[in-house]
Image: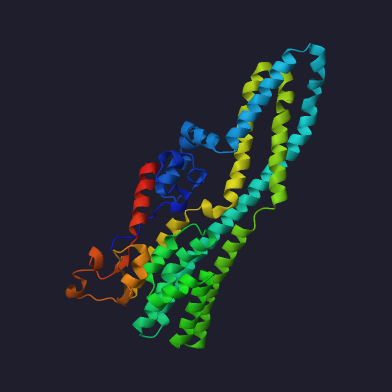
Amino acid sequence: MASPRATPNPDLSVMDGSAYARFFSQGHLFQDRVYAYDDWEKQRGFHRLAPDLLTCVRVLSCSPILAAVVYSTVISVFVHFAFTSFSSHHADYLDHIDEAYKYITFALSLLIVFKTNSSYSRWWEARKLWGRMFDWSRHLTRQVLTWFPEDDDLKAEMLRWILVASYTLRSHINPKVQEADDIARVTLTLDQYKKWRVSKHRPLTIAMAMSKLIRRSGVSDIIAVEMEQQVTIYVNCTGGCERIFKTPVPLAYTRHTARYLMIWITFLPLALWPQLDWVTCIATPFIAFLLLGLENIGVQIEEPFRILPVVMYCSAITGNLEEVMRSGGFAVELPLPTTAPSAWPDANPSFSTCRKKTDSPADNAKAPNGSSGDGSGGLQRPQHMEQQEKSMSDNNA
């Protein structure tokens, strides 16, 4: 079975496939990716210092930056023509404005730095939560394969829940993502899928189901407590993600910082004109672009799940789980139904099968739906997700 591939976050792309819309999408522009060695080499090079004109155009096109830069340009042009038409003594008082600007600029810098730092803290906390999801899934899968009794059906039921847990959490914090439903349809049994489908809080439903399975397994109290701690970690990660997503940086602070910045940009030409004259019309929008970009970074990373490559994390978690299951002598086959999604529950009531791994050539000669036939099966991605992956890969190239 080929290892699952890291795929771009489909909810950050435009579903209609419009290259123009993807180009000017703020989500696509600010999206992170999982770094490899070559990425670090590139980041340490000159590339980070040289401005990418294409990226600058994309940043500038992001509303409200473009509107604010145009606004600052209009104000600076107005100030220039207004004061060049006056006699010099009418504009003498402008020489003292730069003194006042020193004080308000210092306060503005504090506001922007605090906003950016607060947003970065939220982004880093979200990344740590998904790091714990990696550890949780590996530990619990290993414990199930090691400590559960020799009951393949019980193990299979538990492993199905673990496989869909990360995708479920992702869709829970971003309801627009439908990927979890696609994964659940081809992973869970019909009874499991019905419970998962009707649940109003799906991560909690998964946690409850796993706790019940631990109790049914009949493991010793010490082992049960250890496994319950892993379930608690999943619940805590869910709560942490909910806290970040549902509670932004205080709105009063965000709005005051943005409005303070716009007022500062509005009166900036008055402070620059006595020293720069007509160059004010160029310097003002340039300074506005830099400061608005810094403020926009804080706004974009404030909601980190739109920025972090969460779907890549989910794919990596799935790959790790399949590797642990193979190492533990347990394999997963997840055949993809050929019917329309709306007909999946009735067309394929078994959905997926988890079975004991076998080395028999006859058993491994042919796997469902043309899989590799190595006895491991594997999580096969729905066709529309493969198409989104190819589209995003071509766009990134």
- Residue 10: x percent and y percent? 43, 52
384 or 234: which is nearer to us? 384
Using residue 234 as the reference point, say whether residue 3 is left or right of it.
Answer: left
Q: In which quarter of the image is the C terminus?
A: top left
Q: Can residue 321 be seen in this view?
A: no
Above or below, 19 against 346 in this view is: above
Above or below, 19 against 125 in this view is: above
- The image shows a total of numbered marks equal to 0
168 or 376: which is nearer to us? 168
Which quadrant holds residue 328? bottom left
Residue at the spot x=37%, y=70% of the render? 187
Residue at the spot x=50%, y=36% of the render? 58
Residue at the spot x=80%, y=30% of the render? 100
Q: Can residue 386 be seen in this view?
A: yes
105 or 78: which is nearer to us? 78
- Residue 373: x percent and y percent? 22, 67
Q: Quadrant of the N terminus?
A: bottom left
Q: Residue furthest top?
A: 87
Which quadrant holds residue 92? top right
Using residue 11 as the reference point, say whether residue 385 is left or right of it.
Answer: left
- Residue 254: x percent and y percent? 68, 47
Using residue 130 as the reference point, say whether residue 183 is left or right of it.
Answer: left
Residue at the spot x=75%, y=40% of the render? 107
Above or below, 31 against 180 in this view is: above
- Residue 380: x percent and y percent? 32, 63
350 or 166: which is nearer to us? 350
Which quadrant holds residue 91? top right
